[in-house]
Amino acid sequence: MHRLIHSLARFTALVGGLVLIALIALMTISITGRWIRVGEIVGTYELLEAGVAFAIFSFLPITQFYGAHATVDVFTTALPARITRWITAFWEVVLALVILLIIWRLYEGMQRYIGNGETTFFLQFPVWWGYGASFAAGLVACVTAIYCAFARIKEAVTGRSILPSEHESA
């Protein structure tokens, strides 16, 4: 299970990275075209909006798996490892619940846009496509978050590391 979750999180991050690279290329071409007076690419803002949202949700699983979210551990660095593991497990569960809440609301928003048939202004593609892509990456984030929450609880109970942690590398 560990290897599957890691592979899925890694794959999702790679796809998100490729989308981000494509968006950077698109924006560079569009801005360059405007600068040399050839003209910009129509609909770049619409593609950028949907693509960046997808990329953000694509990076969540790998960040979750490695415990690489931003943390403030000024007061916890002096605590014993056992207590730190329990604090980490607690916040991992909270973060999993927050990700589940966000993805649930993203799903509801996607359903609303599917129902009303709204399209983007220039390219006329359905708005829900961007929501759908983000939701697909968000599902991987949910699975990863739930797995990580259980793994961190197991780490706290057993005292044995299961997931990579920023505290171990420091």
Image: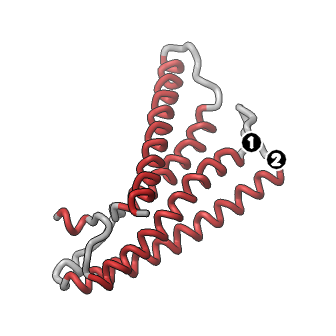
Q: Which residue is mark 1?
A: 126
Q: Earlier in the sequence, mark 2 or mark 1?
A: 2
Q: Position of residue 147 (x, y in %)?
A: 45, 69
Residue visible at 76% across and 52% down in the picture: 113
**Label 2 to label 1: alpha-carbon separation:** 7 Å
The residue positioned 70% from the left and 59% from the top of the image is 109
By what rule are the colours in the image chosen? secondary structure
State which quadrant residue 45 falls in: top right
Q: Is residue 80 left or right of residue 44?
A: left
Q: For the view shown, which residue lies furthest in the right direction?
A: 116
Give the answer, above or below, for where 29 lies relative to 156. above
Q: Determine the secondary structure under disc 1.
A: loop
Q: Position of residue 20 (x, y in %)?
A: 47, 39
Viewer-nearest residue: 66 or 78: 66
Residue corresponding to mark 2: 117
Residue located at (46% from left, 26% from top):
28
Residue 140, percent from left and from top: 53, 57
Q: Which mark is residue 110?
A: none
